[in-house]
Amino acid sequence: MRRAKILIADDVREIRDFLRFCLQDDYDIILARNGEEAWELFNAEKPDIVLSDCVMPRMTGLELLERIRNMSFRPETPVVIITAATSSSDIADGLWGKISGSDAFISKPFVPKQVQETVAKCLGRAPNAPAAPPGKLD
């Protein structure tokens, strides 16, 4: 059975590496250093799911989400936004309305199990995506 392919976009190398560590046993991982690179890799690699930091250079995660939804060959691809913005001022600034176009979001700091469960849940709803591996959420 084909393993699901995950595109991880974050401008911080340590976060990209940590996310890869959390998921590499069960999924094929593609890494992008910014939103623009993620958009190029999305079109070239056709991932089954995208995990994207919200704030990145060249193109934000929200801009990447918008491109995937409006300009891509696979607008139904699940997108998970990763953000450190969780305060009431962020809600007042309308950030949550923009994130609501994503399939899920993960707040920083996060733990491996949270990432694994979020990916498995999103892949379970994704058309044409391989199923998440069973029993690997510990």
Image (tube, rainbow, N blue to C red):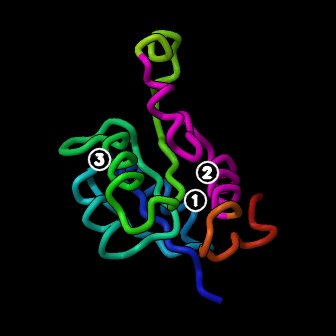
**Which label sits on residue 11?**
3
Q: Where residue 78 sits: x, y (%)?
A: 54, 56
Q: Where residue 104 sits: x, y (%)?
A: 59, 43
Amino acid at dot 2: Val
Relative horizontal placement of residue 72, taking residue 98 as reference (left or right): left
Answer whether residue 105 is magenta in the image: yes
Q: In this view of the protein, which residue sits in the foreground, 19 or 40? A: 40
Relative horizontal placement of residue 49, taking residue 136 as reference (left or right): left
Residue appearing at x 57%, y 59% in the figure:
22
Q: Which residue is mark 1?
A: 22
- Nearer the N terminus, badge 1 or badge 2? 1
Placement of the C terminus among the 4 image quadrants: bottom right
Residue appearing at x 71%, y 63% in the figure:
124
Mark 1–mark 2 Cα distance, whole angstroms, equals 7 Å
Q: Seen from this angle, which residue lies furthest left?
A: 58
Residue range in magenta is 94-123
